């Protein structure tokens, strides 16, 4: 095992720690880690990220369910259109993206570059939501019509399918604002959506990519170990402060990715 691979596995532990400590955001680290440290191309990296995020979120769902913080009915309602969109994105949309997206003079935007820049833009939005402390919304007991949930699920599912992240930072506000679920329960409910979406999306990749199962399973197991440690440490550390600090870190990483891809 070389130094780069060891650093990659340390990164996997950090991904899990972040997920365990603040309940989300760790998936945002997975793709840059796989691309820039371990040298995977963005399509493979986003596929591996879906598996890591999906498996890790399954552990998180169980932990939140024990605390009564998962609304399975609403979660599954969002999951159906979302996992259809994620699967179709990974199976057909991502493989169908041309290798050269744009060519102006000597400057070209390749498929990999386009995916990473789109990923960085989503990271910027996620970092702002982590840094900015929103007001607690008073929820009503009246759910929205299902056709709205269906359209929202399709939209978020397509985005998360392209970038290979779990999309918890998109589903949590969607559940609070659109499904009228209290914040704490929205965080837990988002995990079941992320679990289903990510693993079904990854099934689309299995049909188009050669998967290095030995590496992927090792990386995932280390991430889950990080979650267990992170959940334990979260009892002693303020999650809100950590979330804000992590938001600034994600902001810096997003800017770094954009600069690196465009230079």
Image (cartoon, helix red, strand yellow):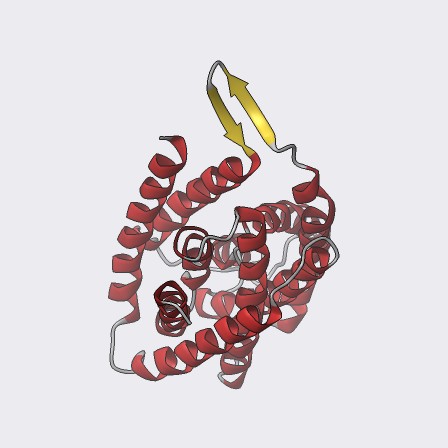
The answer, for residue 57, to whether it is visible in the render is no
61, 228: nearer the viewer? 228
In this rendering, the answer to whether 68 lies above or below 162 is below
108, 19: nearer the viewer? 108
In this rendering, the answer to whether 212 lies above or below 35 is below
In this rendering, the answer to whether 11 lies above or below 96 is below
Residue 44 in the image, given as x and y percentages of width and height: 58, 53
Residue appearing at x 65%, y 36% in the figure: 97
Residue 115 in the image, given as x and y percentages of width and height: 53, 41
In the rendered image, the quadrant that contains the N terminus is bottom left
Instruction: Tell me which corner region of the image, top left, top right, bottom left or bottom right, holds residue 189.
Output: bottom right
Furthest residue in direction top, as rendered: 105
In the rendered image, the quadrant that contains the C terminus is top left
Residue appearing at x 58%, y 63% in the figure: 194
206, 29: nearer the viewer? 206
The answer, for residue 88, to whether it is visible in the render is yes
Instruction: Tell me which corner region of the image, top left, top right, bottom left or bottom right, holds residue 136.
Output: bottom left
Residue 215 in the image, given as x and y percentages of width and height: 53, 70
157, 163: nearer the viewer? 163
Residue appearing at x 61%, y 70% in the figure: 213
In this rendering, the answer to whether 196 lies above or below 132 is below
């Amino acid at each position: 095992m070389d130094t780069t691979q060891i650093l990659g596995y340390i990164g996997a532990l950090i991904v899990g720690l972040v997920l365990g400590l603040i309940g989300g955001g760790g998936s945002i680290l997975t793709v840059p880690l796989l691309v820039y440290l371990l040298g995977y191309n963005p399509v493979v990296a986003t596929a591996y990220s879906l598996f890591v995020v999906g498996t890790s979120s399954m552990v998180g769902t169980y932990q939140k369910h024990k605390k009564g913080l998962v609304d399975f009915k609403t979660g599954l309602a969002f999951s159906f259109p979302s996992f259809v969109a994620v699967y179709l994105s990974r199976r057909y949309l991502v493989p169908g993206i041309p290798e050269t997206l744009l060519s102006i003079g000597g400057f070209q935007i390749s498929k990999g570059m386009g995916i990473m820049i789109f990923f960085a833009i989503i990271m910027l939005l996620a970092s702002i939501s982590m840094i900015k402390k929103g007001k607690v919304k008073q929820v009503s007991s009246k759910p929205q019509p299902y056709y709205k949930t269906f359209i929202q699920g399709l939209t978020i599912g397509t985005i998360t399918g392209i970038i290979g992240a779990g999309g918890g930072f998109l589903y949590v506000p969607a559940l609070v604002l659109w499904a009228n679920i209290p914040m704490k329960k929205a965080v837990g409910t988002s995990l079941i959506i992320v679990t289903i979406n990510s693993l079904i999306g990854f099934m689309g990749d299995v049909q188009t990519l050669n998967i290095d199962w030995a590496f992927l399973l090792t990386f995932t197991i280390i991430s889950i170990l990080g979650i267990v440690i992170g959940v334990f440490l979260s009892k002693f550390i303020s999650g809100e402060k950590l979330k804000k600090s992590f938001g600034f870190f994600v902001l810096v990483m997003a800017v770094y990715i954009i600069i690196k891809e465009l230079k």
